[in-house]
Image: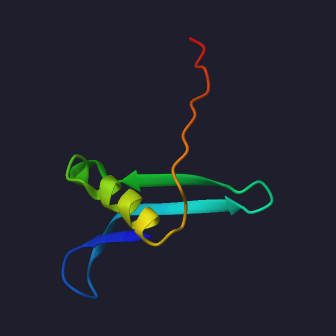
Amino acid sequence: MLALAGDFGFGQVVGVGEYLLDPSRNIAEVAFSINKKFQGKGLGRIFLKTTFDEDFVALSCSFDKLDK
């Protein structure tokens, strides 16, 4: 997925997103990166919503323990 800002054909990429599906385990890894100038404007939320609306993935989150 790409988020573009600017005139058509001359836009700047301000966000990217991707998902990697492992069908053998029925899981996916999702990643988004948004340009700092465009953070806090909901682009990551739009990427995540689009991912669900297109039935790319179903949400199941887990967080690894972080060691300091």
16 versus 31 height, above or below:
below
Q: Position of residue 42 (x, y in %)?
A: 24, 54
Q: How many marks?
A: 0
Which residue sits at x=54%, y=40%? Answer: 61
**Residue drawn at (45%, 54%) of the image:** 32
Tell me the quarter of the picture where residue 26 sits.
Answer: bottom right
The image quadrant where one finds the C terminus is top right
User: Where's residue 3, x and y in %?
Assistant: 33, 69
At horizontal 46% and vertical 61% (from top left) the residue drawn is 17
Q: Nearer the viewer, residue 37 or 52?
A: 52
State the quadrant of the N terminus: bottom left
Question: Which residue is nearer to you in this view: 45 or 4?
Answer: 45
Residue 10: horizontal and vertical position, in percent?
A: 26, 83
Furthest residue to the top?
A: 68
Residue furthest to the right? 24
Q: Position of residue 24 (x, y in %)?
A: 80, 59
For image coordinates 67% across by 62% down, the residue present is 21
Q: Residue furthest bottom?
A: 9
